[in-house]
Image: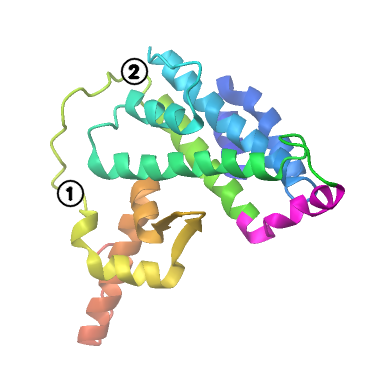
Amino acid sequence: MQKLRETIEHFSQWDVLSLYLDRMEGHIESDFSTSLENAKALLESIGKEICKAKGVDLSAASSINGVLKKAFCALGYSSIDIVNRVSGALASIGEQIGNLRNEISPTSHGKTLDELRERNNKVDLLTREFLIDSTVVVAVFLIRAFEERRDEAVQVEDPEPSAELLKYDELEDFNEYWDEAFGEFIMNDYSYPASEILYGVDYNAYETEYKAFQASQIEEETGESNEPFN
């Protein structure tokens, strides 16, 4: 949560979003449906603001999934395969946040007294933290991508891939190692390997971890310390 607070403090036009953060943080244990409601509203607000600034029309009936996908496209990512896949995955997280909110909210449908007492126990604390952390990652990425590309035109043609860019599908050994260590993130019927999420959400971190993995492999094979990236 702190990283998102720092981001909106740095880009002050977004500081009104602090209202959502306070509610998300304040209710994560006592009334998680309120946290989810504000997490969903946070992502929708950011997505709609980006679409508005980029001149992208949204239907009044657009789902959070649709809003987020259009926001990614508005930022020029629609033609980049890996980011497009990850944006779809993260948009699905947003959609599931909305669905889960409807399931546990005390006001979405009438509930019996027992259902009202137990509704907050349907989601364990670890899952709550994952959902909120996922929201924060998406929110930070969208705000920074928008602000750092504010003056750039949206790409309309497929960009040439950088010769320096690591190709996710070609690094099976590292991806398997990372996925074995951190597993898959599962929500309802959706699951995403940790390596793919890291690659799409924070490429620099993925590259750093890959290089460390590569260095450790060389060290194991040769029995000598190898520090080519210092």
Question: Of all residues shown, which one is farthest toward the bottom?
Answer: 223
Check disc 1 and report its element: helix, strand or loop.
Answer: loop
Q: Main secondary structure of the magenta part?
A: helix
Q: Quarter holding the N terminus?
A: top right
Check disc 2 and report its element: helix, strand or loop.
Answer: loop
Q: In the depicted view, which residue is nearer to us: 220 or 126?
A: 126
Query: What residue appears at the point 69 percent right and 41 percent down from the top-left corner?
Result: 35
Image side of residue 162 versus residue 95, left or right = left
Query: What residue appears at the point 20 percent right and 53 percent down from the top-left corner?
Result: 167
Q: Amino acid at mark 1?
A: Glu
Residue 40 rendering spot, x and y as whole percentages: 59, 34
Q: Earlier in the sequence, mark 1 or mark 2?
A: 2
Query: In the drawing, what numbered circle is on residue 164?
Result: 1
Query: For mark 2, what is the residue?
Result: 151
Question: From what the image shows, is residue 37 above or below residue 2?
Answer: above
Q: In the depicted view, which residue is nearer to us: 134 or 93?
A: 93
